[in-house]
Amino acid sequence: MDLTADEARRLILRAQGFLGAGGRKGGPAGMLRRLGAVQLDTISVLARSHELVAYARLGAVGRPAVEQAYWSGSAFEYWCHAACILPVEHWPVYAFRRRAYRERKFRWHEVPATVGDILDRVRRDGPLTTGDIGGAKKGGPWWDWSDSKISIEFLLDVGDVVCTRRVGWRRVYDLAERAIPAELREIDLTDEECVTRLTAIAGRSLAVATRADLVDYTRVRDKHAAMLDDALLSGASGLVPVTVAGWPAARKGGPNAWADPEALALGEARGRHRTTLLSPFDSLIWERARAERVFGMTHRLEAYVPKEKRVHGYFAMPVLHGGKLIARVDPAREGATLVAKRVTLEPGVKKLDAVEEALREAATWVGCTGLRIEEIR
């Protein structure tokens, strides 16, 4: 099947909840199931990134309602594209990753011999934070973790414990046997079955994706990446090959993308587009090559770039309007005023009206009563 780049873009926007009414069904919990993964990050400017993802699709939904949907027992935190909130029904799908961590017996650190003691502590006293079990690090650089921190993170990686919520951005850990329903823990999938199902989840969320997009979503490597390829080529993933005009050609010829057949069956994507600010960690744009291919915007998070070298700002947020990315805004808050420290308009965009609309709506959502734009480029 052949798609124009514009058709692919609209299918992606619909699947991601930005086009048409379907993206609002079920509120934050429904949104999480459709996206399959919502990335977490420590940076908070207007709000935490996982809150911004819900806001971008649902509008001024109450922030407590978002947190409740994420942490009410219907979701858990684990490694997908990055550290993500995931629907609890996806627990069996990540067994391949839990097994891989257990086989390696380390991640960033060697696992201390006291790991069993930490598991016993959670079993006896949980749910617990790192503060409860002995602190997060020894006092040096961020990676200089204490033995208790290393142990609890390894237990999370291998699935003995689960992050059930965050308090003050600290993970709260509990036993998987207490946090995950027994019927999900009892499902035993092979690595191939896990990767096949995860590829299907990624395909539904992305609607139209290259192999690289699917690998980026799932973060599979080596033998697991080969399993993803097998799932695509055999048809086991349920995704179908398509050719998107203007997208890079496949390395070995043939179709250059894969599509969710349900998205294709819905036909042309129509409806009202959201005008909104996007978190840089939003799944619509979290992969730079995909964002450039689909929207023509090369976007880089500059939070870790020296201030004097930043082009768009510390936490520049792309502005989505009419299904296109029209600008970037670097926001901040001063009391009850939302400050746009820098607004960078995309080439060809002449008016600021849609950007101001997005900023005023966001200001209301976070409880600001004023708006100030300091610089326009």
Image (cartoon, rainbow, N blue to C red):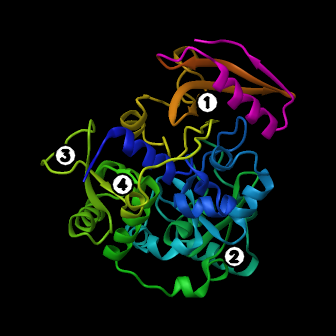
Residue at 51% across, 30% down: 325
Q: How far apart are marks 4 and 1 (CA)?
A: 26 Å
Q: Position of residue 290 (x, y in %)?
A: 38, 40
Asked whether residue 159 appears in the rendered view, the answer is: no
In primary-sequence order, the first of circles 4 and 3 is 4
Query: In the rendered structure, which disc, 4 or 2, sits on the residue that comes first in sequence?
Result: 2
Residue position marked by numbered label 2 in the rendering: 121
Please state, as top left, top right, bottom left or bottom right, where the N terminus lies in the image: bottom left
- Residue occupied by mark 3: 250
> Is residue 37 highlighted in magenta?
no
Residue interval drawn in magenta: 348-377
* Amino acid, disc 3: Ala
Estimate the spatial distance between the alpha carbons at disc 2 and disc 3, rounded to whole Å: 51 Å
Q: Splitting the image into 4 quarters, where does residue 165 fall? A: bottom right
Mark 2, other Cα within 10 Å: few <14 / some 14–19 / many ≥20: some
Q: How crowded is mark 1: few (under 14 residues within 10 Å), some or many (20 or more)?
A: many
Residue highlighted by disc 4: 214
> Quadrant location of the C terminus?
top right
